[in-house]
Amino acid sequence: MHGPLPQDTSTTDTSALSPRAVGLATLALSVGSFGIGTGEFAIMGLLPQVSGDLNVSAPDVGHLISAYAMGVVVGAPLITVLAARASRRILLFALMAVFVLGNLASALAPGYLSLTFFRFLTGLPHGAYFGIAALVAASMVGPKKRGQAIGHVMLGLTVAALIGNPVATWLGQWLGWRSAFATVAIIGAATIGMLAVYLPRQIGLETSNAARELSGFARGQVWLTLATGAIGFGGLFAVFSYVAPTVTEVTGLSSSAVPVALAAIGVGMILGNLAGGWLADRALMPGIAAILVWSALVLAAFPFTAHHAWLAMINLVLIGTTVGLGPALQIRLMDVAADAQTLAAAMNHSAFNLANALGAWLGGVVITANYGWTSTAWVGAVLAVGGLLVFGVSAMLHAGGRASNRVAA
């Protein structure tokens, strides 16, 4: 069992906040996570449309996914450290404004190279927004409800996979892929308005400092936990990134079935998010190991099920459940980060988006090498095993440290 989540160091008085006020503020934060999630995932369902319109190959469009992910990887630590002295409230507005502008620019991009740059730009505020939103949500409730509050913010991300991504795909197929990014920009603008109205003015005024946040990088367990996510989570994105052409070329379904496939993954992601949190609360370290083993198994099964419509859809639900690694590693990272809470919360999303970039890139490599669309699942299974090996090192060091503490006592 893991210890309690580290307390945020803020001194905000939340005793005067009503449950309704907390609920509306959390909803506003969750709408932001829904918009960001929809914007991140939209390109995956529109891969054929973007490929045809810009006259580039499907693996090249996969690199757009990697560009966004690298924006997250770079932006999360950079923004967290450089803007440490700014209030979290101001940062939330600024980050969402950058997100809106990035999506508008993506919708208007004249070509592949400019779109690649704009996807990178749009990814910059992603990790910092989720990290700060999680801390702000936690600051509005008591210590025993912090995990639940963070879960409500993250719910927007999983709902994006279930509803936002299929709707964006359908919209992009109907009106063109650019309309999907324009719609995401509208959701971001709505988030800014909701935050202005519903986020209590005494919330999010806390600041940090660069030295405190950077101290997290001196901890080996922080790096091992980040590496576990960056490698082990890549399997989901190796398959997810190319699900549209896989469903049409391998499963033999029409393009109208792509939103259904995306919704199947979304259902799995919601189930996995709930299961991952449940496991983390009861047995954190064994739970992380179990999720990684499960990931390897369900990914390895996909090449055998992808040729049959119903089996493929069921397998995609199961692959979606591997997202349960997210809440478990978030808690683990907060446990080992000590005073670097903002950086830890943001870097978790950097790790997962590095996994996004790695999975999409390696998936594109095997497709380009003519191993077939389902070869991405074998890549995913190998990544899950790689994450398990890294986590094994972390777990052994963790057990060794606890044994040393008992001897010293």
Image (spheres, rainbow, N blue to C red):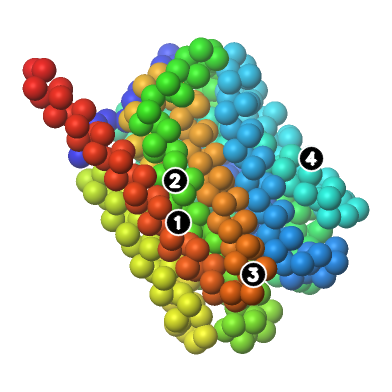
Give the side of residue 317 with respect to residue 328, left or right. Answer: right
Sequence-first tag of 1 and 3? 3
The residue identified by callout 3 is 369
The residue identified by callout 2 is 229
Q: Residue furthest right?
A: 110
Which three-letter amino acid code belongs to the residue tagged 2?
Answer: Gly
Q: Residues within 10 Å of mark 1 (few under 14, many from 20)?
A: many
Q: Which quadrant of the figure contains the N terminus?
A: top left
Q: Residues within 10 Å of mark 3 (few under 14, many from 20)?
A: few
The residue identified by callout 1 is 383
Q: Are marks 2 and 1 in contact (CB under 8 Å)?
A: no
Element carrying mark 2:
helix
> Which dot, 3 or 2, sits closer to the camera?
3
Q: CA distance from mark 1 to mark 4?
A: 34 Å
Residue 121, percent from left and from top: 74, 39
Of residues 73 and 18, which is closer to you in this image?
Answer: 73
Q: Which quadrant of the figure contains the C terminus?
A: top left
Sequence-first tag of 3 and 2? 2
Residue 245, percent from left and from top: 65, 74
The residue identified by callout 4 is 101
Q: Are marks 1 and 3 in contact (CB under 8 Å)?
A: no
Q: Is residue 311 visible?
A: yes
Sequence-first tag of 2 and 1? 2
